[in-house]
Image (cartoon, rainbow, N blue to C red):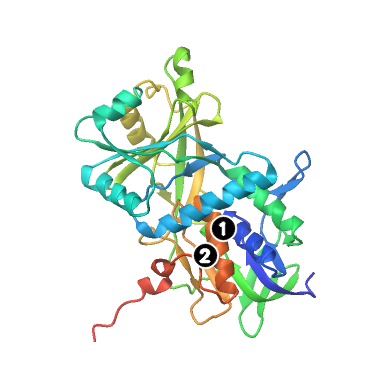
Amino acid sequence: MTNDVFDMIVVGAGIIGTCAAYHAQKAGLRTLLIEQVRLKFKSETKYFMFPVPSWAWIWKYAHTDPQYLPLVKDSYEQIEQMEKLRGEKLWIKTGMVWMGQKAEIEGVAKILSDFKCDHELLSSSEIGKRYPSLKYGEEWAGLVDPMAGCILADRWLAVFQDEFRKAGGAICDETRVDSFEDGEMVQIKTRKGVFRSKKAVFALGTWINKLIPGLPVQSRNELISVAYWRSKSEKDEHLTEPANYPILLANEGRIGWYSLPSVDYKGAVKFAYHEGQVYDLNNEVVDMDQKFIDATREHIRVHVPFLDAENGPWRVDRCKYAMSPDEHYIIDFLPGSGNIQVAGCMSGTGYKNGPSLGKALTQIALGKRPFADLSSFSLNRFTPKSKM
């Protein structure tokens, strides 16, 4: 394989890299997908799978920034097509309640209106009537996104990797990239040899600055305490199920929480603080800061009182975020290169747009204009502007 020349090499087999590889291969580019860890082959389902830290993640149209809406819409369309192709369910529609300050909620509603996306603006009392398990006071405003739901994250990764392989794509796992060179050909150097390609995409997650130390932006890596909470009473366990419990976002200024129904673990709602503990890749975090759990416990106690805040959480998992300074994506060519694209710093929201970003990255590699405007994700926004 190291003697071959590929049209495209994608480094990183998370959802962004996997979808970029899939779209490149489907577009006729001979593509290699490189991953540093072992991709688990599941014999019972016959496809590759990259280990993910959670099963269900949030999928929604509602955003505070309009540049995400074209990406979200395209991802919905792709997943609908993939479900038909595979004959399997890849997400669970639950709807979403977004609670926040009036100005924030009205801003989100305007963006949804501009893109002709269904939604409802509701008072906190109206939210309470529709969702009796949620208790938010008059100081809160509410928005309902009826098309929101739970991404089945492991399934997304598995099916896109499988379809990539079926289309003739090559996978090289357990292969760490040590360095690279850019010229007429991109050279990816590993302990297994040197791989060559005309184009490359680096989708490195939290490892972005490890491989590209000269990148003009530093990823802030955060470790999120993903906490799960059970109902106080067994008779209320049904309230945790997707049919009864919507996706929930709750923001108090810069402080925010997110919650999903009991998809990951039976009878356990995922309810977590949308901020984490900054960490260094070279140093394992043993003890997480308790403030993230304490703040979540208090929010649940006041606003979702059927959950057992006093004796919870029932379980705490961990999830890694790669954050940019402004908490928006980085999608751009490596400075000085016309061959290597960088897709990183997804800031905890990139998974749902993996299919659409993969499509856009392939279009750029082919020299085409991407279907969505990605200029707001350019590295140029971090370059100091001249005062001249």
The residue wearing badge 2 is: 343
Q: Alpha-carbon distance for marks 2 and 1?
A: 8 Å
| Rendered residue at 55%/67% (across/down) | 361
Residue 153, given in percent of the width and then of the height, sits at 57, 44
| Rendered residue at 52%/49% (across/down) | 76
Asked which secondary structure carries label 2, the reply is: strand
Q: Quadrant of the C terminus?
A: bottom left
Residue 101: quarter of image: top left
Q: Amino acid at mark 2?
A: Ala
Residue 89, given in percent of the width and then of the height, sits at 62, 38
Asked which secondary structure carries label 1, the reply is: helix
Residue furthest left in the image: 139
With 85 as the anchor, is 275 left or right in this view?
left
User: Would residue 130 be seen by someone viewing this image from the given angle?
Assistant: yes
User: Would residue 351 be seen by someone viewing this image from the given angle?
Assistant: no
Residue 228, given in percent of the width and then of the height, sits at 47, 31
Q: Is residue 332 above or below residue 120?
A: below
Disc on res. 111: none
Q: Amino acid at mark 1?
A: Ile
Compare residues 215 and 105 and report the one nearer the observer. 105
With 13 as the anchor, is 345 left or right in this view?
left
Q: Residues within 10 Å of mark 2 (few under 14, many from 20)?
A: many
Q: Is residue 39 above or below residue 26?
A: above
Q: Quadrant of the N terminus?
A: bottom right
The residue wearing badge 1 is: 16
